Every structure is written in C-alpha cells, then in structure tokens.
C-alpha cells in the first residue's frame, strides 16, 4: 500500500506546476495563495475535527504558518507568474541542494566531497536552465523571476529544517499551520486590496492547488515515507520530468532541450550529494 501512496503523491505533484501556471492566468499570486490555503484549511479542519486539541505546542505554527503558506507560496507563485512553468519548477526543485547549503551554518554539518560535487553539478544545472543553455553570455531573460524561483527553494529548505523537531502528527501540524497561515494570508490580501471573488474556472484552479499541492498529497507522502522511505525518495526524482510532460500537454509550453538537460543536472546533483 505504501508504494501506491508514493505513486499517487508523485502523480499529483507532477500536475501542480501546470495548475499554478493556468490559475495565474486569472489570479494574482496572492489571490491564488488565499483561495488555495483556504481550501487546505478546510480539508485539514475536517480531518482534524475528531481529534481537535488546542495545546501549547501548536503555538509553533504561529511562525511556521507565516513561512508556509504565506511567504513560501507568495514567492513561488510570483516566480511562476514571471517565468515559464518549466523554468520555475526547475528552480524550485533545487530545495534539496539549498538544504545541504543551509545545513552547514544551521545544523553545523560539514559537507563531504561528494556533497560539494553534487552542489556544483546542481547549481550548474540552474545556470543551464536560466540561460537556456547559453552559459557563455549568462544572459537571464528575467533575473527577478530566477531569483524568486531560487528563493522559494531556500524558504522551503528552511521550513523543512524548522520541522525537524516538530513531533506533532501531520494532520495536527498542517491544520494549525494553515489556521495561522490563513490569518496572515487573509490580512495581506485585504491590506493590498486583492480580495475579489474569482470566476469559476479560476476558483477551480485554486481549489485544485489547495487540494493537491498544499493538502491531501502531503498526507499521501507522509504515509509513503513512513512505510518505505527509500522507494518514495527515489520515485520523487521523476516528479520534475513528469511535470514537463503535463506542462507541454496542458499548458502548451514548448519544452526547451536546455530545460531537460539542466533539470537532469539538478536531479543528478541531488542524487550525488545525498548523504
């Protein structure tokens, strides 16, 4: 059963880059965060209702909810809003590389020669994607978009590290994160004048993102990792490549060869650098 959970999570996560890009054709990044996080809050509220138990540990979500969903998804969706979906998802997928980098000052880990080689290969892959293979000129089509995509990876890696000592159950943790997070998101949406009722297809896209990027897929993934971490971790590497198929078919982007090569280098760097 654990393999089915892993396969289900991988298939669903492979579709979300396309959902981001299509939804951002109708919504601003902050509006998409608002309706998607509201959907996730509802889902986790239903799942958590039976075991609802306010306790001191849940105050940790006061800052975790600020990071995710507000900061992380606003930055991520802003990257998707500026870049092609294939580029944005490649840059965001560098978060395991960022995790290695952040572990040095935060966790005091000394990187091995293998980890350093993986970082070099992975970040060289970032340059291949960003320059569309023209490394000699280092000309970025949208430097701000590239920076946002890479920054989203830093934020997610930081969030992952902060969760290392969080022993709450996945449902409890996600409910409180989204409860606090939605308060922040709603406040930001109201203060920026972004609150508006979207048209049905835009709302459908946001609900899809809330269900299958922020919500239920995480529970599938937690279950898969608990039962067979090696299988789930290895399978996860096909997500960005399968995502390119959906981006091509659903969004209609022409996939650049440099994206495939650069993404292969990023994934290769992650695999090589794995401790």
Image (cartoon, rainbow, N blue to C red):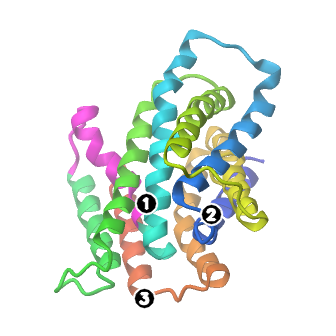
Q: Quadrant of residue 25?
A: bottom right
Q: Residue furthest top?
A: 56
Up-down: is 154 above or below 174? Answer: below
Query: Residue at point 46% right, 47% down?
Result: 72
Kindly report the distance in space between the C-alpha atoms of the residues bearing marks 3 and 2: 21 Å
- Along the viewing direction, whichever of 167 and 33 lies nearer the viewer: 33
Q: Choose the circle earlier in sequence order: 3 or 2.
A: 2
Q: Secondary structure at mark 1?
A: helix
Q: Which residue is mark 2?
A: 16
Q: Quadrant of residue 26?
A: bottom right
- Along the viewing direction, whichever of 143 and 157 lies nearer the viewer: 143
Q: Quadrant of residue 105?
A: top left
Q: What label sits on residue 257 in the rendered view?
A: 3
Q: Residues within 10 Å of mark 2 (few under 14, many from 20)?
A: many
Q: Most prominent secondary structure in the magenta stretch? A: helix
Range covered by the magenta-colored residues = 91-112
Q: Residues within 10 Å of mark 3 (few under 14, many from 20)?
A: few
Does the image show residue 89? no
Q: Choose the circle earlier in sequence order: 3 or 1.
A: 1
Up-down: is 193 above or below 162? Answer: below
Question: Within the magenta stretch, is there residue 107?
Answer: yes
Residue 234 at x, y percent in the picture: 54, 58
- Along the viewing direction, whichever of 125 and 118 lies nearer the viewer: 125
Q: What label sits on residue 117 in the rendered view?
A: none
Q: Is residue 81 left or right of residue 123?
A: right
Q: Choose the circle earlier in sequence order: 2 or 1.
A: 2
Residue 77 at x, y percent in the picture: 50, 59
Which marked residue is nearer to the observer: mark 3 or mark 2? Answer: 2
Which marked residue is nearer to the observer: mark 3 or mark 1? Answer: 1
Kindly report the distance in space between the C-alpha atoms of the residues bearing marks 3 and 1: 18 Å
Q: What label sits on residue 92 in the rendered view?
A: 1
Residue 275 at x, y percent in the picture: 35, 47
């Amino acid at each position: 059963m654990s393999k089915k959970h892993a396969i289900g999570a991988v298939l669903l996560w492979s579709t979300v880059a396309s959902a981001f890009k299509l939804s951002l054709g109708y919504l601003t990044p902050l509006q998409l965060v608002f309706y998607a996080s509201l959907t996730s809050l509802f889902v986790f509220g239903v799942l958590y209702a039976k075991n609802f138990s306010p306790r001191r540990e849940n105050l940790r979500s006061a800052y975790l909810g600020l990071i995710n969903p507000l900061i992380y998804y606003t930055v991520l969706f802003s990257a998707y809003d500026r870049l092609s979906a294939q580029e944005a998802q490649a840059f965001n997928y560098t978060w395991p590389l960022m995790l290695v980098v952040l572990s040095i000052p935060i966790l005091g880990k000394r990187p091995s020669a293998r980890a350093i080689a993986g970082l070099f290969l992975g970040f060289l892959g970032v340059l291949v994607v960003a320059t569309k293979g023209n490394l000699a000129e280092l000309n970025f089509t949208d430097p701000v978009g590239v920076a946002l995509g890479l920054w989203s990876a830093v934020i997610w890696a930081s969030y992952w590290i902060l969760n290392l000592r969080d022993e709450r159950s996945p449902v409890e943790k996600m409910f409180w994160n989204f409860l606090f997070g939605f308060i922040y998101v709603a406040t930001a949406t109201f203060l920026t004048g972004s609150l508006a009722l979207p048209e049905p297809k835009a709302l459908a896209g946001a609900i899809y993102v809330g269900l299958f990027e922020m919500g239920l897929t995480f529970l599938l993934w937690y279950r898969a990792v608990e039962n067979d971490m090696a299988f789930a971790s290895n399978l996860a590497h096909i997500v960005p490549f399968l995502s390119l198929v959906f981006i091509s078919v659903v969004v209609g982007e022409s996939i650049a060869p440099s994206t495939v090569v650069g993404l292969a280098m990023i994934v290769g760097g992650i695999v090589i650098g794995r401790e």
